[in-house]
Image: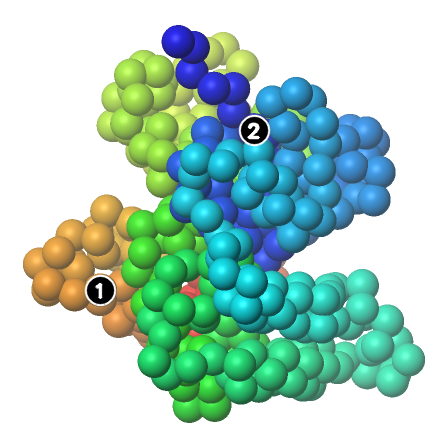
Amino acid sequence: MADPAPVVLYSFYRSSCAYRVRIALALKAILCTMKIVNIDKGEQKSDEYLKVNPSGLVPSLVTPDGEVLTQSLAILDYLEVAYPQSTRLWPQDPVLRVRAVTIAIIIIADTQPLQNLSCINYASELVGRDVTQDWSTHFIQRGLAAVEELLSSDDKYCVGNDITVADVCLVPQVYNAINRIGMDVEKMFPKVYRIYTELRRHPAFVAAAPESQPDWPSAEEAVRIALQYKGLQYESIAVDLVKKEHLTAEYGKINPAMMVPSLVTPEGRVITQSIAIIDYLDSTYPETPRLIPEKGVGRTAALSIALTIACDTHPLQNLSVFQYASEVAGRDVRDQWVTHFIERGLSSVEELVQGGGYCVGQRLSIADVCLVPQVYNALRFQ
């Protein structure tokens, strides 16, 4: 019997709506091919994506029959109906079903849409100043307060002891509250936080998390920044680390070290390690802006900062490293582990950064290219 055809999910790691669908797919163990839509680059408004979803929103899910589905709750409902043998997310009991759907809709309809960039930008325009923090905090607090009132301390999850659509919607919202707004959810909404921390350890939720996605900013982000800064055309091919695609024989032929990123030159030569790739780009495309100063103190300073991040800080945040640390500790130490080494690395960088517009003087350098993805990740871990 042939394997079932996969669905196709158009996703962006930071989209909470796509996050919900990723969780459901993982819980239900449904085969999925993921296609990245980079919202930061405006790819959701590209002609190519608008042919898939004319509304220009993420996520979109293409069924094995070629039907395009949009709106995360509608997609979750489709997965529930189309895959009846998979894990159920809608309770069979009518009362529990209503409770689960109520919590889901408080998040999906009353809370999350008010955090959309277009909404916040328009609010800021009307007020005449940036209201991102105040606006987001107000509506997230309002939404989570309503959810907190609906939760029972006797239940393991939002509704009883089974994961439901309410949990699938709750986790992305709390993730954003903690990592994007800096909200003290543990203190303000203890029942919400207890359920969130329990679910974040679940394998399906780990697989669906933003930091587990192939487009999560990391070492390859430094290479993308360099390519874009130099105005070089390139094709990006995602390697899903969570699905261990970097360990496949196919990828091993490209990079025997089985690490990401890898850059294939126009001549077919494979270059690995982000610092080596940036050095190659400087040498091969001399007409483009240099990122590694040619000589002198500036070169040493730029490389010192870049290597502090690329060698002493970033590798210690790799998924395999903190998973092993958790195994040794006998508990989940991810947040504590990552926070410790990011703080250590950025403290060193703070001492090395010179006065001026950028890390080293008035021009962008390899130091800046390496710094931005690391600080971005630091903010995600608060």
The residue indicated by pointer 1 is 332
Q: Quadrant of residue 276?
A: top left
Give whichever of 270, 131 is nearer the camera. 131
- Point out residue 244 in the picture as x, y percentages from the top left corner: 32, 33
The residue lying at 34 percent from left, 80 percent from top is 154
Q: Quadrant of the C terminus?
A: bottom left
- The CA distance from mark 1 to mark 2 is 32 Å
Q: Amino acid at mark 1?
A: Asp
Q: Amino acid at mark 2?
A: Val
Of labels 1 and 2, earlier in sequence is: 2
Label 2: which secondary element: strand
Residue 373 visible, this orientation: no
Q: Residue furthest right?
A: 126
The residue lying at 58 percent from left, 39 percent from top is 81
Give whichever of 156, 345 is nearer the camera. 156
- Point out residue 75 in the picture as x, y percentages from the top left corner: 64, 44
The residue indicated by pointer 2 is 7
- Point out residue 204 in the picture as x, y percentages from the top left corner: 37, 49
Q: Quadrant of the N terminus?
A: top left
The residue lying at 35 percent from left, 21 percent from top is 251
Residue 164 visible, this orientation: yes
Label 1, residues with CA under 10 Å away: few <14, some 14-19, many ≥20? some
Q: Residue furthest front?
A: 94
Label 1: which secondary element: loop
Instruction: Give the side of residue 15 with respect to residue 212, left or right.
Output: right
Give whichever of 30, 184 is nearer the camera. 30
Q: Closer to us: mark 1 or mark 2?
A: 2
